[in-house]
Image (cartoon, grey):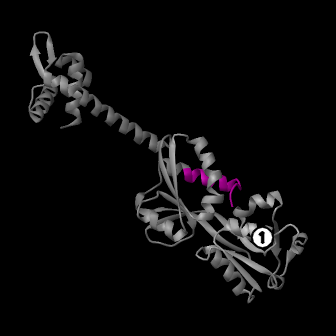
Amino acid sequence: MLLAQIEGFLEVARRGNVSRAAEAMFVTQPSLTARLHALERELGEPLFARTRRGMRLTDAGRAFLPYAERAIRAVRDGKQALTDARSATAGRLVLGAAPAISTYVLPGLLQKFAEAYPRVEVAVRTGHSEDVLQMLLREEVQLAMVRALRHPDIESTPLYEEGLVLVVAPDHPFAERGSVGISELAGERLILFDRTSSYYELTQSFFLGLGVTPREVMELDNIEAAKKMVERQLGVALLPRTAVAGELAAKTLRQVAVSDGPAVAQQIVAIRRRDLGPPRGPVAAFLELVRREDTAGAIG
């Protein structure tokens, strides 16, 4: 059963005349008649009774009519959905993100995205970067924001560099100083978070690379808990800048530079499956928003 046959059936049903219907559809009368005969053969029932006054629907034709109308509406709605998806005026966007990104970066971005594209439905899946990569490869997410990863089946778009900063409580002795030396940190309790995360590895590498072993270590399973421990003067921590931006602004934490240590940072990227071609619709719109916000210094 062809779409053209259903369209022809509906046009003849509306006009009650094959020649007028053919004219409205810009086809010849024999071509339209052939479509109707093919549809009737497939359905096994005559759909029209030919009378002096034109074409009248049979009982079978009247029974088929609402389903034909529904089919045409479904096709038109489908075409409109594709148009909306291409222009990002509607559709669905499924994002993957590492925990620190989904907690501290995505909310602000998604607020702006929702304001610009209110009809796009958004879902977010979270996990460590390697787990999110697997979600992407299994096509469970369309786009993911993670630390830089290598895989032959993905393409990456650099977004921003996430730096780790040393934070202390406001009344910690380091708080009033612009910087401290790495040897001074060796005497402090170091608060680490999430042993399975890349930030844990970065912190460990930072101290090992400088040949320094902290006097004492406290391990926690998430950034929020680590921040609370620092605020209570239970230690110092190297935490992602985006994760402590609010506390630094509120002065519940203070940032202190490490004068003789290298900067600690990792690249945050957006990844997509390489075989999907250029981004379109909501994916393209979200990427453009992230690039624009990054350029404006709104993230990172």
Left/right placement of residue 219 relative to residue 119 reads: right
Q: Is residue 8 above or below residue 17?
A: below
Rendering quarter of residue 48 = top left
Rendering quarter of residue 54 = top left
Q: Which residues are magenta?
A: 286-300
Q: Is residue 35 visible?
A: yes
Residue flagged by tag 1: what amino acid is it?
Val
x and y, in percent, of residue 24 in the image: 26, 21
Q: Magenta stretch: residue 77 in it?
A: no
Residue drawn at (9%, 26%) of the image: 46
Residue drawn at (46%, 58%) of the image: 141
x and y, in percent, of residue 53 in the image: 14, 9
Residue corresponding to mark 1: 230
Q: Is residue 52 above or below residue 205?
A: above
Left/right placement of residue 192 relative to residue 281 reads: right
Circle 1 residues within 10 Å: few <14, some 14–19, many ≥20: many
Residue drawn at (51%, 56%) of the image: 95
